[in-house]
Amino acid sequence: MNNFIEVFDIHEKYILNQTIFKKYFYDADALKKPEKNIIKKYIDNIKLVTLLKPETIKTPSYEDENVKYLEIALIEINLLKNDKLEEITKILNKMVQYPIALFFLYEESVTFSLCEKRLDKVTNNNNIIENTLVIENINNYSKLEEYYISLMYLNNMNLYKYYLDLYAKTYALKLSKEVADFGSLASKKLDGLKEINERIENINNSILTLKNKIKKEDAINRRIDLNVRLKREEKKKIKLIEKIRGE
């Protein structure tokens, strides 16, 4: 968390560290009972660390008919159990009107999450969730230093561009575990990163399915056929990664 504060260059006077009481969620009509139970069972405490806004990071706010980016909230959550992180991300983004960067703390583990959301044109609430991005154990990523440096140069045209660029750089970090070249990934647009992720996930799923079938198959001829298909998928993944690095 402190590394993010440093790279965002937040002055000490803007650090809030304000408690967000869980009662706020328990009393919310917008949340269903299972969502409230997740807050109760998995969260110890919630803290608003700071707000990224024009006066704190010298970046203009932005608002149109689809999105509202007046401030970005940095929120820290201490967990009772290290689970349900995507669900908690969605709950917090449903309840907090600002765009959010969430930091989940559990023992030595730090998980970082972001969420793309837009305005509900009926209620004008900023809580329609489109995509979430959850990076578990962020400190275990080998390209973390390159990632932090990239955050010092986020698009500061406005807070909407700033958040989208943060989302894209974080997506690049996620993919760097597979591609091992953060630099080439960080230069790509978010849509391109999502396409790469989908292609890699499809190949990984095929590889996992084939490995499971090989374990269960007794017929030699069938096992040979499955191994040939497995090698073909593994080569496809290698070629895809080489192509991404070369772009």
Image (spheres, rainbow, N blue to C red):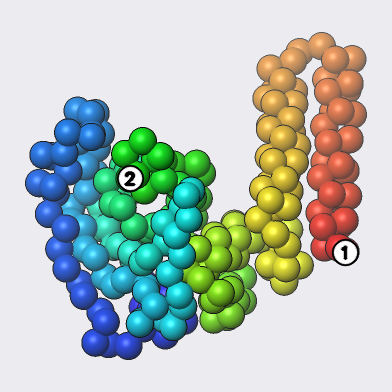
Q: Which of pointers 2 and 1 lies earlier in the amino acid sequence? A: 2
Most foreground residue, 109 or 118:
118
Residue 94 higher or lower than 180, as above or below: above
Residue at 84%, 49% in the rendered image: 240
Circle 1 residue: 246
Which residue lies at the image location 70% right of the left edge and 59% below the top edge?
189
Q: Name the residue under label 2.
A: 125
Give amino acid for label 1: Gly
- Residue 247 image position (x, y, % from top left): 86, 63
Q: Is residue 1 toward the left or the right of residue 179 in the image?
A: left
Disc 2 residue type? Asn
Query: Taking the image as drawn, is residue 30 in sight?
Result: yes
Q: Is residue 73 left or right of residue 231?
A: left
The residue lying toward the viewer, choosing from 109 and 27, is 27
Disc 2 crowd, CA 10 A, few/some/many (<14, 14-19, 20+) = some
What residue is rendered at 72% in x and 68% in y? 187
Is 92 in front, or is 227? 92
